[in-house]
Amino acid sequence: MDTNNNKDKKEVTANLRSPKKASLNAQEAVKIGWEAFKEHPWLSIGVLIFSQVLSVGFNFILTNVNGVYESFAMGPVAMVTNQLISVYVAMVMIYAFLRMYDNKDVNLGNILLSWRKFVNYFLVTILVGVAVLIGFMLLIIPGVILSFKLSLAPYLVIDRDMGPINAIKESWRLTKGNIGYLLSLAILLLGVNLLGLLALVVGLVVSISVSFYAGIHAYRTILKTNE
């Protein structure tokens, strides 16, 4: 009986997650994010922990091996290296959550990704960051708009293997008419993570996982509505 119930729940979740049945509704994205987390609770938490271990491990090596800390930790090379590590960890997390959202296997072999994809992801991160920064310098509102218009570019690099320029162009096209949806989702997820913060470490791990899944669902839904 329990096996049948679990199967029925997975079928219901799969139907909700299907872009054909989904709508551009922020509450629905959060709901599906929660359902996706309940399907993969320990794996989701494991990915978050792994990403932190990866980041801390790289930084430990950078700043402590062979007395590097005193001469190197505060230098420009260290700052660039730390940024590269942060971008790589973010890329790994997005890819892992994409695979979990799609109910695909997640292991070291498929989440440590290629250097070519990393270079594309790093470049798109830099280009989007510069564009948004310039937008914020132009009285803030343009920066907010650009942050949403270009928000799908990192997903497109990872999920569709696009180059940075094509990913930015495609994100601009896909988000046309969807800024309100993305804004409302961002506000909802802010509330979810504030609640998670109030619940301390466990709550924050859950809320971050739900946020990843909700963002991926929004991305997939927007893709489908533009096909």
Image (cartoon, grey):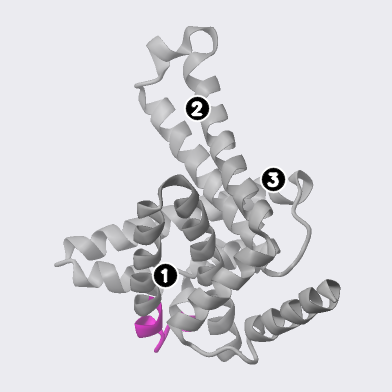
- Residue 162 shows up from this direction: no
Q: Looking at the image, which residue is at 52% across and 38% down?
A: 85
What residue is shown with label 3? Answer: 112
What residue is shown with label 2? Answer: 59
Q: Does the magenta stretch include residue 138?
A: no
Q: Looking at the image, which residue is at 30% across and 74% down?
A: 145
Q: How many numbered marks, from 0 up?
A: 3
196 or 1, nearer to the observer: 1
The amino acid beneath tag 1 is Leu
Q: In this view, does 8 lie above or below 200?
A: below
Q: Where does residue 166 sit, x and y in percent of width and height?
A: 54, 70
Q: Where does residue 211 sit, x and y in percent of width and height?
A: 48, 64
- Residue 41 shows up from this direction: yes
The quarter in which the N terminus is drawn is bottom right
Residue lying farthest top? 67
Q: Looking at the image, which residue is at 59% across and 36% down?
A: 54
88 or 40, nearer to the observer: 40
Q: In this view, does 127 lie to the left or right of 13?
A: left
Give how far apart the Cα atoms at labels 2 and 1 are: 29 Å
| Residue span colored magenta | 173-182
Q: In this view, does 46 lie above or below 135?
A: above
The amino acid beneath tag 3 is Leu
Main secondary structure along the magenta-highlighted residues? helix
Q: Is mark 2 on a helix, strand or loop?
A: helix
Q: Is mark 1 on a helix, strand or loop?
A: loop
User: For residue 150, which numbered disc appears in the image?
Assistant: 1
The quarter in which the C terminus is drawn is bottom right
Looking at the image, do the residues carrying marks 1 and 3 touch, with CB atoms under 8 Å apart? no
Q: Where does residue 42 sit, x and y in percent of width and height?
A: 67, 52
